[in-house]
């Protein structure tokens, strides 16, 4: 362990006192509360994972949460199985029929996305639900399964205390513009490229 001189310790303390004052003033200046539209997008892994991490935080505060999955079908995922333990707080709706290259039927994909969007609007209209996760809605919008303008308008007009998380790569510019918080997951390295398959507990 490197020894720290009294002078160095004093300089560090003085620096941190100044930094704390700036930080405290910045935090104190933020006085608004509102429901957020959060978009997790980008080519990297972890967009849905981040949304479900936020859901876990919300559950810790006793919030009711709604999840609508637009692309994933009735996969037996770990997160879905885990949320069964919170059935009093979580409503989970996997309403997709798989990825478009699996269904190979655009009309069927559009119908599934429309049903999922109806469920999303139903959850967003409920006063007891405080967080709604629209998993891979960005994918449905990318393939024009849903009318972009109508979706963005509905999300923008949601009630003022409702938080909504939208996931999926290739978020449309209109979705990004409407959002309060946008995080882009970058792809630096992925194990798929080295021939490692999707694994239980990591991908699903």
Image: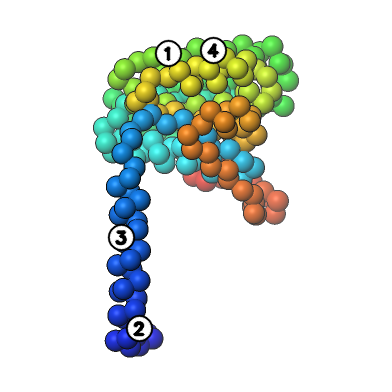
* Mark 4, residue position: 115
For the point 38% across and 86% down, the residue is 2
Residue at the spot x=31%, y=81% of the render? 9
Q: Which residue is mark 1?
A: 122
Above or below residue 26? Residue 144 is above
Whether residues under marks 4 and 1 lie with C-beta atoms below 8 angstroms apart, the answer is no
Report crowding for label 2: few under 14, some 14 to 19, many 20 or more residues within 10 A (C-alpha): few
Judging from the image, what secondary structure is the residue with disc 1 in? helix
Q: Position of residue 45 (x, y in %)?
A: 58, 45
Return the residue nearer the eye: 175 or 86: 175
Tell me the CA gap for discs 2 and 1. 59 Å
Label 3 or label 2, whichever comes before in sequence order: 2
CA–CA distance in space, label 3 to label 2? 20 Å
Of marks 4 and 2, the one in the foreground: 2
Mark-to-mark CA distance, 4 and 1: 11 Å
Task: Please identify the quarter of the rendering in which residue 184 is found.
Answer: top right
Measured as percent of width and height from the top left, residue 68 is found at 48, 23
Q: Which residue is mark 3?
A: 21
Label at residue 8: 2
Compared to 23, does 9 lie above or below? below
Q: CA distance from mark 4 to mark 2?
A: 63 Å
Res 88 quadrant in image:
top left
Q: Residue at left 42%, top 31%?
A: 36
Name which of mark 4 and mark 1 comes first in the sequence: 4
In the picture as drawn, the residue positioned furthest to the left comes out as: 62
Regarding mark 4 in the picture, which secondary structure is present there?
A: helix
State whether residue 98 appears in this view. no
Mark 3 crowdedness (10 Å alpha carbons): few <14, some 14-19, many ≥20: few
């Amino acid at each position: 362990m490197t020894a720290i001189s009294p002078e160095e310790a004093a300089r560090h303390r003085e620096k941190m006192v100044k930094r704390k004052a700036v930080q405290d003033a910045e935090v104190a200046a933020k006085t608004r509360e509102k429901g957020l539209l959060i978009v997790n997008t980008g080519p990297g892994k972890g967009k849905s994972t981040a949304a479900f991490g936020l859901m876990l935080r919300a559950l810790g505060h006793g919030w009711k949460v709604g999840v609508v999955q637009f692309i994933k079908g009735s996969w037996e995922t770990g997160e879905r199985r885990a949320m069964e333990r919170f059935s009093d707080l979580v409503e989970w709706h996997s309403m997709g029929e798989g990825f478009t290259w699996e269904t190979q039927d655009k009309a069927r994909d559009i119908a599934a996305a429309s049903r999922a969007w109806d469920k999303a609007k139903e959850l967003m209209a409920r006063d007891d639900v405080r967080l709604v996760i629209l998993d891979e809605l960005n994918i449905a919008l990318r393939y024009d399964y849903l009318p972009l303008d109508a979706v963005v308008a509905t999300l923008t007009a949601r009630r003022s205390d409702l938080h909504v998380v939208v996931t999926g790569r290739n978020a449309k510019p209109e979705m990004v513009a409407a959002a309060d918080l946008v995080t882009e997951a970058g792809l630096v390295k992925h194990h798929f490229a080295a021939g490692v398959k999707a694994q239980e507990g990591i991908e699903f």
